[in-house]
Amino acid sequence: MSNNIRKVLTVAGSDSSGGAGLQADLKTFEEYGTFGFCAITSIVTMDPDNHWHHAVQPVEVDMVDKQIKTVLAGGRLDAMKTGMLGSVEIIELLSRMIDKHDISNIVIDPVMVCKGEDEVVQPENGQAIRDLLLKKATIVTPNLFEAGQLSGMGRITSLDEMKEAAHKIVELGAKHVVIKGGKALQGEQAIDLLFDGKEYVLYEAEKMDTNHNHGAGCTFAAAIAAGLAKGNSVKDAVLLAKKFTTEAIKRGFAFNQFVGPVWHGAYNNAEQRMTR
């Protein structure tokens, strides 16, 4: 491998439909010109005969351990991100691994709900993420629901509440937090809020009337991780990730009647590659 190719690990669940999870992460890493590794924590399936109902099957912790050891046999990573973490035991393993290998540029995407589902996925994992992973995070990337869970505030409906939640999450140990307001807040702008313990930075984009946003959160967090791996500051990594993800949503498409994924290649016009 060329020395100038940066290496990024995702520890996340598998989404067979390809829009979210580690599939979204690996696609995003490639678009950023970084080399992606993965450790699968959960296998998520969707049932087309039951209104796309999600089922989550965690991977045994010993197998996750073996996957991570395989990745780390290649030397130091430039960044890593987490997505859906299948069990408290996996979260504990990941916490020990980060300490042992002194990994930097850590993006914690605290996935708690599968898009299209209303129930929290494995609620005990949220507490373990709070206790074990936030203090190790370079940046945490919750959506409004996840920010409400991590901060203990519950439902978040305004920018002022986003700021309060961000402050509480940084107090839990994260160096930075970016709360994804998306299109859930009132107003014409999709707002993300970055906080480093001192300064609030808003990232805004025009809201898009689309349901083709499956995988947007995973893609955003993966883009931040790849940006950090390439040496960008947190602010610059978040800014570019916002642009990257906005283009991906703009050019999302209908996979079937239940889901429409973002197009991870949109920013770089990937569909125009390899025409011969």
Image (cartoon, rainbow, N blue to C red):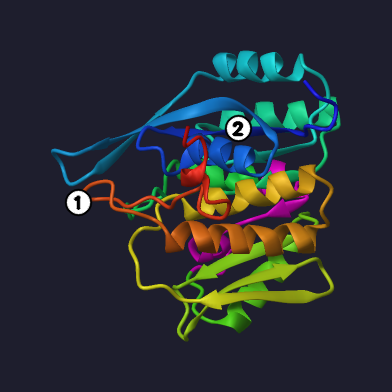
Circle nearer the N terminus (2, 1): 2
As drawn, is 118 to the left or to the right of 34? left
Looking at the image, residue 98 lies above or below residue 50: above
Q: Residue at x 48, y 34 (%)?
A: 13
Give amino acid for label 2: Val
Q: Main secondary structure of the magenta part?
A: helix
Report the number of discs: 2
Does the magenta portion include 133? Answer: yes
* Other residues around mark 1 within 10 Å, as few (<14) / some (14–19) / many (≥20): few
Numbered disc 1: secondary structure: loop
Q: Is residue 151 visible?
A: no
Give amino acid for label 1: Gln
Q: Position of residue 199 (x, y in %)?
A: 81, 75
Looking at the image, residue 26 lies above or below residue 148: above
Q: What's the CA distance linking mark 2 and mark 1?
A: 29 Å
Does the magenta portion include 64? Answer: no
Which dot marks residue 11? 2
Q: Which residues are magenta?
A: 130-154
Q: Position of residue 258 (x, y in %)?
A: 23, 50
Numbered disc 2: secondary structure: strand
